[in-house]
Image: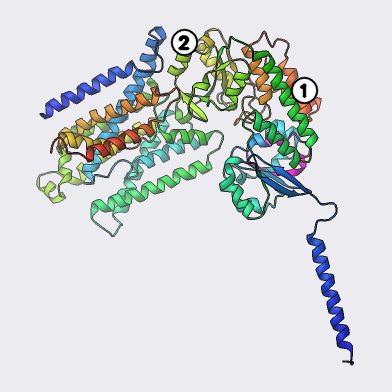
Amino acid sequence: MRKGGLPIIILMLLLAASLAVYLIWQMKSPTPEESLITVTGALGRTVNITLPINRVIIAGKGSWPIVSAAYMFPSAKNLLYGLSEGTDVPLLKMVDPDIESKIVPTMGGTPNVEEMAAENPDVVILKTTLKSDVGDPLEELGFKVIYVDLEDLNSYMRDIMVLGKIFGDEAKAETMVKYYNETYNFVLERTSTLTERPKVLLLCYSTKGGKVSFQAPGAGWLQTFMIEAGGGYPLSKELIGTGWNTISYEQIAQWNPDIIFLVTYSDEPSANDVKDMLLQDPDWGSINAVMNEKVYAVPHDCNNIGALGSWDATGSRWILGLEWMAKKIHPYIFSDINIAEKAKSFYIEMYGLRDGNTAAVVDGIKGDLQ
Amino acid sequence: MRQSARFLVLAAVFGAIFIGSLFVGRYSRADELGTTIILKRRLPRILSAAMLGIALSISGTVLQSAFKNPLVGPEILGVSQGAAFGAAFVILFLPRDPITMEALSTVFGLLALLASYAISSTIRYGGRILRLVLAGLAISAMFSGGVGIMKYLADPYKQLPELTFWLLGGLSGVTWKDFLYMTPLALVGITLLLIARWRVNLLTLEDDIVVSLGTDPGKLRALVVTSAVVATAAVTSVAGIIGWVGLTVPHMTRKIFGAESSDVIPASALLGATLVVVSDDMARTVSASEIPLGIITSLLGATLFIFMLSRRGINE
């Protein structure tokens, strides 16, 4: 080697090393287009998420209310790709024709953390109940996890704003919150001063374990809140258990409800089938609601497997259910309300359905819509 | 107090509780509907509770004698878990009618018992009874795992809630039809055990002594154990798994009536029926919503168990 060549080689190596460090630094630093959003979920934790968000998973037990709320954001159909079984219902298929391909069977129940990680999501949205089993392990692996509840009016409003941030559409979130608040206040304005409140019982009929049983929602559940806001006295307020409470016929007879709302979350039998059965059963004939034929099947707008399409449950249409209940409890006070028209405008404004699809959904609604 | 007097007192207590239960419930008005409720809702339910108590208690009593082990009950030999597996299988894969449920529960309960017998002969540890109990524990765990797999496979919207509800156990919603479905098979098992009650004592002796007394211990054991399984599976198919009755009641009965099986078996039937009827009364009346019966029998049974074992026996 020629004398003096070594310093040049060393200089070139130093230059190459500097260039490499610069390039690595460039790769790790946010590009000018990248930025962060800060999201505070249901548990009050603040999570920083790097934009852009391209892949969102909504998984785990009880994730269907989140899915039904998420699809009200137009961007959801491009961002969601990991959904649990049972969420590909007709209404959501109209919003996202590819929803079936986004179903991952292992995303139900308590999803496998490693499988979720393998999907490489930018954000995972979970119910708060899944924090320790799913959320914490995911965060240990470096994934961003946001928790939501969607269990009552306040958490619904808060969580819609959270979803708005994740799906990059806070304006739509505000529109939705405004719609839910205005509808709720509209009902409340007419019912809050009522002194006569009929006794109302929402019953879920089931043939679990081969035996007929009736269950009623707990005092803290959305259905109880809806009945009270709708101007009724919810008999389920007297229940001590959380969740669904098994109620004997004897207890129902003792309560003697003036109005019964029925759900089955199934087509075998449907709520309408059960209604017909009760109206013809002589044992039920002396109960006020049956005697006065004030037994109503709660509307649902999906294939009736699970509660996703039912208007009493925590899916997005509970707000329609609130108006429907109010009208059934106080038909004269709400005589100016056309529930089918309300539903049409809801599907158009909230889910962005076109007229043809909207008509198909409304025409397909089961239960006592009118 | 003489045995006959004890029987009379126990029968009177049961009779009073049975009749009293008819007039205790959430519906308190004495009108036409009240009468309908007593005849169509409370009566079949109280009768079912009594049948449940009788079947579980008698089964527990004879199984403890047959296996010379005070810790044995239908659940120890895998019978309850086997029956639960059968019911879960029906909920998941077959039309859910009560007869199919009862049949499959009984078949799997018996299969669990047979499997326990078969496996016990392959265990190279301990005496015959210990081997059987160990095999029963293993079979119970296997069927329990099977039920777990069923829960995993179950559709979370329809089948899983049904399965969970059934596994919790209870008599909520029981009608005359349910009572009539469970009764024939349960009565066959109970009647056979009552007929064999004079001989059940023999099973607590060594087998060669039993042979010398002119009885085949193998056949006798097979008869009483099969009868116990049939009775247990029949009531389990309707009520689900109800814990502690089959373990607690035999011990309580022996404390009061001594160890003579001809006394203990009918007495445990009365005591078991009383305990389950009282428990079910609490399940259906304490609050507006039903409390799962299994929770109350566990609480009440375990409390009585501790109380009885911590004081001197009446017959000591």
Residue B89 to residue A15: above or below: above
Task: Tell me residue B72's x, y (percent).
Answer: 27, 44
Identify the image quadrant of residue A266. Answer: top right
Quadrant that contains the N terminus of chain A: bottom right
Mark 1 chain = A
Q: Nearer the viewer, residue A255 or B240?
A: A255
Q: Amino acid at mark 2?
A: Pro
Q: Nearer the viewer, residue A39 or B37?
A: A39
Q: Nearer the viewer, residue A34 or B46?
A: A34
Task: Tell me residue B127's x, y (percent).
Answer: 23, 55
Q: Earlier in the sequence, mark 1 or mark 2?
A: 2
Q: Which residue is mark 2?
A: A282
Task: Tell me residue B128's x, y (percent).
Answer: 24, 53
Neighbour tally class for label 2: few under 14, some 14-19, many 20 plus, Cα within 10 Å: few
Q: Is residue B190 magenta?
A: no
Residue A259 to residue B292: above or below: above
Disc 1/disc 2 C-alpha distance (Å): 41 Å
Neighbour tally class for label 1: few under 14, some 14-19, many 20 plus, Cα within 10 Å: some
Nearest to the eye among marks 1 and 2: give it. Answer: 1
Task: Tell me residue A193's x, y (percent).
Answer: 64, 12
Mark 2 chain = A
State which region is magenta.
A67-87
Judged from the image, the secondary structure of the residue bearing numbered disc 2 is helix
Quadrant that contains the C terminus of chain A: top right
Judged from the image, the secondary structure of the residue bearing numbered disc 1 is helix
A352 vs A269, left or right, is right
Decide: marks 1, 2 in contact (CB < 8 A)?
no
A265 vs A362, left or right, is left
Q: Amino acid at mark 1?
A: Ser
Residue B145 visible:
yes
Q: Which residue is mark 1?
A: A345
